Image: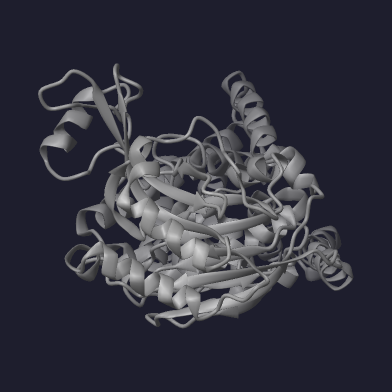
Amino acid sequence: MIHLSKKWRYLLSILSGILMVLSFPFTGSLSLLAFVAWIPLLLIEKNTISFRHRSGRIFVHAYLTFLIYNIGTTWWIWNASVGGAILAFVLNSLLMAIAFYVFHKINKKIGPKFSLLTLLTCWIGFEYLHHNWELSWPWLTLGNAFSIRPSWIQWYSFTGVLGGSSWILLVNYFGAKLLQHTFIAHKKWQWNKRTNFFLLGSFGLPLFVSMALFHNYKELKNPLEIVVIQPNIDPYDEKFTIPLEDQLQKILALGQSKITPSTALILAPETAISEAFYENDFGQSSLHHFLQNKLINWHNKSLYIGASTYKLFPIKNSRASIPLEGGPGFYENYNSSLLMNGNKNYDFVHKSKLVLGVEKIPFSNWLPFLESLSIQNGGTSGTLGIENSPKILRAANVSFAPLICYESIYGEFNAEQCRKGAEIICVITNDGWWGDTPGYKQHASFAAIRAIENRRSVARSANTGISCYFNQRGERITASKWCEPTALRQELNRNKAQSFYTKNGDYLGKLSLLIVSILAIYSLFTRPKKMI
């Protein structure tokens, strides 16, 4: 095998990072590059073991690769928070580099026979954990790279997005193996028929299956007319300077322009009601009276709208509980969604998947002083209250999964809502914080994955864009433009059937964690194997 010099190792690390960026939606959207992006990094790892170099260099090269990946795909976070962006780039790259380093250490000990299994389970296990812990930031889950290619990933209804991550790693592994044998180890092409077969099979078979599913999947006709509203209210200025009643008048006027006698549900974006109110008094409030009168004029349609709310508690309810000034008692702030039905009933759902730093202070349940510091440092910052478990809402003609902003990235969370009876998915969000950047486009595209995973139609209301609809194959049907006050109307088919993924959730992640734990324990009692 050719020894890679320091210069070549760094060039390959940089190349891997650039290819990952270019393969991701709206920072290149060259999806095919995802199948070769890991090859340079895997060649460095192979070279390090073959020449028995210290493992520390793998961590350095992996960190460089993933830092480029993180900055190149999510640089737009900078527009909302400079400090948050730096923390996200540095910390998320570190976590990815650690995951790859763990793969290398296990691979170095137990040898090449298990290298593919180690790579898959180590990385998929990491992604699963990254969906389910205090520092959760699953935006860059590898399988998200195909959110703009729904015809490629119809089998996500069996595997979820982690299946897409496995697909990328599998093809890259065999691509790296072929490159090692053919060009680096100077072996002839025909000697690697097995590798060629696995490379072509691992790439082509999932694609073939997906295309077949895509062209043969038929939605049951069970239509529901939904209107989504995009008011285009500047989240940095207008949202806090224009009176709330004027904002609501604008939102409702846009809705009025699209509703018909057949309209069943109207969606308005996250925190459309930006002034926080006490949930228990809502039924007697002027706000309730104002909205209820509009619904009566709309012949008792159902309105699903974002709100800022709070609740009071006699004792501390959770880590989000804040002592009342002068006491006794506590209050909790929520990023909420509100469903109002024409029969004067209403229901709240609190956002459960919170944005780090903005809505959640990580580890404050173990280090409470962090929460106190956040409260002292200003505003409504600090950890918000959440639901105990995923909830669904029921309007007159439909049960739906309410997703607020960031929650639409969490497949297993949404799958549980669908198991509980959600027939469609409704996303409300405010993506205006980042400006006209890839961020809001990426966020909108991820809803296609939720549609495919659960075979549920999706309606999406965003403050500044993109407001849109997806069918059960993940195809975008109708969409608004960025920074355009508008409303859209669309019929979506409901679905009660549960896909394999809906029933089983992220089983790939759980299985990967189990297997990689066994491999890690095994490696502790094994002498390093010679890597050929």
Residue 377 position within the rendered picture, expressed as x and y whole percent measured from the top left: 11, 41
* Residue located 64% across and 53% down the image: 161
The residue lying toward the viewer, choosing from 14 and 203, is 203
- Apparent side of residue 244 relative to residue 466 in the rendered image (left or right): left
In the visual, does 171 lie left or right of 402? Answer: right
Q: Position of residue 159 (x, y in %)?
A: 73, 49
Q: In which quarter of the image is residue 397?
A: bottom right
Asked if one can make out residue 213 in the rendered structure from this viewpoint, the answer is yes
Compare residues 521 and 211 and report the one nearer the observer.
211
Compared across the picture, whether 34 is left or right of 60 comes to right
Can the viewer see residue 24 in this picture? no
Q: Determine the residue positioned at 28% across, 65% down.
A: 245
Give the percent coordinates (x, y) of residue 455.
Answer: 75, 57
Residue 128 figure quarter:
top right
Does 57 sit left or right of 258 as displayed? left
State the residue at coordinates (52%, 35%).
105
Q: Where is residue 489 in the image (x, y as percent from the top left)?
A: 60, 76
Query: What sort of colour scheme is used for the picture?
Result: one colour
Write the residue at 31% across / 21% down: 366
- Above or below residue 526? Residue 285 is below
Q: Camera-side residue: 34 or 303?
A: 303
259 vs 276, nearest the viewer:
259
